[in-house]
Structures are given as structure tokens and as C-alpha cells.
Image (cartoon, rainbow, N blue to C red):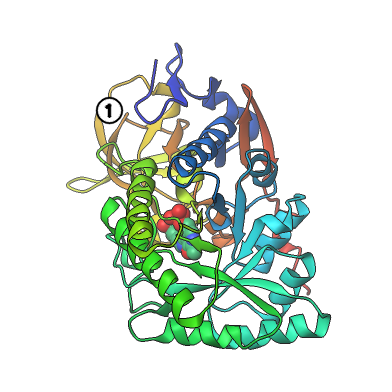
Amino acid sequence: MKHYYSDHFTIGENGHICMDGVDLVTVAQDFGTPAYVMSESQIRENCRAFTEAMKRNFGERYKVAYASKALCAKFMYPILASEGVHADVVSGGELYTALQAGFNPKHLHFHGNNKTYKELVMAVDCGIGSVIIDAFEEVDLLETICASKGVHQRVLFRVKPGVHADTHEFISTGQNDSKFGFGIEDGEAMRLAKYILQHEHLDFAGIHCHIGSQVFSVDGFARAAKIMFDFFCKMEQELNITMDEMIIGGGFGIRYMPEDEPGTFGEKLDAMGKVMREESARLGREIPEIVIEPGRSMVGAAGCTLYTVGSVRDIKDARSYVSVDGGLPDNPRFALYQAKYDAVVANRADAPRDKLQTIAGRCCESGDLVARDLTFQTAKAGDILCVFATGAYNYSMASNYNRVPRAPIVLISDGKAREVVRRETYEDLVRNDLI
Ligand code: LLP
């Protein structure tokens, strides 16, 4: 039986929830809980759908670059490489992971509003595709590094398009009051461009923007595309240069709850494509190579988390708390953003959703919830819970709070489950303790 969440989830005849035909209750038994489970076929499908939508709008001049921050672990990179997808990184650690996985450094670009000297050296040394500059100081730093090594580095820089995305304040980034990027209106972006051009070892290739994350409406994307394209042309004219690339970020929202209507990334890319074709005709400049950086929309819905229920506490005239063996350490998104998640009892997924319950994590922290006030099958100790759409910003934001070892990632490929990131051990936890 199909499950509403996506084609990758079904309910087996035994009432168990399955991912790509694999019984997730068995996965919980085999690999323990909590565990992240990812669908390789869903990740690949997403790579292909993005590629198709980009091709449809921008012909052969496009790149899909996965935003590593959504989920960074070695297993991701061979999948991306085989789908022709590039990636961005935002730290030495993400860069190291991609390189360790054998990813082509030319297919990487490096973001961050405060990259360190060491990280920039690492990026230049590996021959990274481009660095997206986000500070005047970074220009000096990068020039010094490149000059000392006698190499050139391809660079873009981050622009603030002044668009306010309709999303949580903490994940909205394109507006003027943001620590990211340089403003167009106040002339800062032009000033940075001129500054970059004064540096001999930096090859200036284009501009970047990202308006925010988990954005549903088409409008912000279309507005950003117009502003970026116009500014791109203005820069070329005023500075008498030719650039070849424009990165328009990620941010495509996904469904977390049944009632969410995120729309499709296809419709957002079509809207951006349309605006750019119009501006291209109006301004007489062909559309440069367009790059997108989807993170959440690439992996979010491809993942779920399995927990074991330890206890249930029905509090009179208050909530019913279902406590699980994970929570804040594997998913801090409720604590940070009051994020919502849907869940089922994995071993009775065919039973009616009959009780309002709150899924509580195991940490000594009242804000450690996974889902508040969710109606799903009445849970009892020993049940396995499956929480949907945890593929993005869960493993990558995990911590060892309360000295809880990090959960493993189990990858479902071709009807088989295997651990691709192992569960942390107690020895891992004390590895860095020196005395
Ligand atoms: N490109 C840049 C420059 C970004 O800063 C981001 C996300 C992305 C691409 C990917 O955005 P996505 O397609 O995943 O929406 N921890 C937060 C999300 C932070 C996103 C930060 N930047 C969360 O859990 O919701």
C-alpha cells in the first residue's frame, strides 16, 4: 500500500512502513535505533529532476551543485558524481569530506562569510573550482595565498539581492540586514567587484546569491533572478568585463507535514528561467551559465529517522509524551526553529491515526522535542517510530549533547540496507579527551 509521504514509502502487508520496499522495522532491528535511513534512489531521482528542469530552462549552460551542508558524509559524493552533479562546501571539514570521497575539486565551490586562512590554503591547494568571496578581507587573504604559490583562483562573490524570503527568520538570507553578501543598492557590491579586479591572481567569474531556505513561493525566486541578471549586466557594462557564471542559490522548500504545499522546484526554476529570458532579450546579453545549489530539496525527503519508544506519559489535562531514544542530539530543528515533523508507528503504520501525542527526545532539556502535538497511532513502549523528511539538516546538525553518540546512516540501495556512516561508540566520545 502506498504511503502518502512519497512514492518511496509504502506500507507492507504486515503493517510495517517500508522504504523502497525494505521493511524499516527490520532495519531498526538490524542496525539499532536511533538511525537515519536514506533512499539512494530518491536522491538520484532528485538529482535527475533538477538536471532536467535546468536543461529545460537553460539549455547546456547550467550546473546543479548540491549544498553539502544539508547532509555531508562520504557516501553522498560518488552518488552526486555519477549523476553529473557538482557541490558546494562551506568549511574545511566539508571540503575534506568531499576530497576524501574522491570528488573532483573542480566540481566544488567554496562558500562562507568567514573562511579562515587555513581553509583558503586548502581550497587553493586542491585546485577548487571557485571560491565565493564574502568579505573584503577575504580578497586580500586569497590574493596573498595565490601570489605566494604563483597560481590563479577563479572567484565569484556573494550579492544580497534585497529580497526577503517568506521563511523562518534564521534561515532567510537575501534581505539587506544579513551577515551574508554585499548590497546592490548601497553600492557595496560594485565596490567589492572593483576591489577584486585590482588583484592579479583572482579571476573574476561572476556573482552569487541565496535568498533563504525552505521557501515555498515562486515570487522571491523570480524577483531575485531579475535583480541578479540586471546587476550582472550592469557590472559588465560599468566595469567593462565579461563574466560567465551566475549562482542563484538553493532554498526550494519541501513537504514536512501533510498540509504543506511547497510547490515544486521545477515551477521555481521555470519562473527564474522565464524572467532571465525576458531580461536577456531586453538587455541584449545572453544568459550566462546558471548554477543552483539545492540542499534540503535534494536529500530532505529522501531520509527518515527511526527511534524506539521507551515510555509514554499521559499527563492529565495536558500532553501525552512519547519518549524516544534520540531527539535533540540527532535532530535539533524543533529546538532551533520549532520545526514540524510527521511520524508514524513504523510497526503499525496501517493503524488509524488516533491519538494526539508529543514525541519527546531523551535529553535533559524541555525543548528537546521531535514533534509537538501530532496525531498518529497510539504509541507504546517498544514501538518503532519513523519520522519523515529528516534527510536534510539532521545528521549534519547532530551533536553529542548529553554525551549521546551520533546515530548511523543506513542507505537503502537496490532493495538492500547497509550502514554508510557507522554509529558512534563511547570510545569515539572520549577520543579527543586528553586527560
Ligand atoms: N546555498 C547557500 C549559499 C546556502 O547558504 C544554503 C543554505 C543553500 C545553498 C542550501 O539551501 P537549501 O536548498 O538547503 O534550502 N539549518 C537550517 C537551514 C540552513 C540553510 C543555510 N543555507 C535548517 O535546518 O532549516
- Residue 348 horizontal side relative to residue 26, left or right: left
Instruction: Give the residue pinned by disc 1.
Output: 353
Quarter of the image where the N terminus is located: top left
The image shows residue 317, relative to residue 153, as above or below, that is above
Name the foreground residue: 357 vs 8.
Answer: 8
- Residue 399 horizontal side relative to residue 121, left or right: left
The image shows residue 381, relative to residue 320, as above or below, that is above
* x, y percent for residue 41: 56, 30
Q: Residue at x 43, y 44 (%)?
A: 57
Return the residue found at the far top: 13
Image quadrant in which you'd find residue 260 = top left
Name the foreground residue: 131 vs 339.
Answer: 131
Q: Amino acid at mark 1?
A: Arg
- Residue 413 visible: yes
- Residue 156 horizontal side relative to residue 150, left or right: left
* x, y percent for residue 176: 33, 77
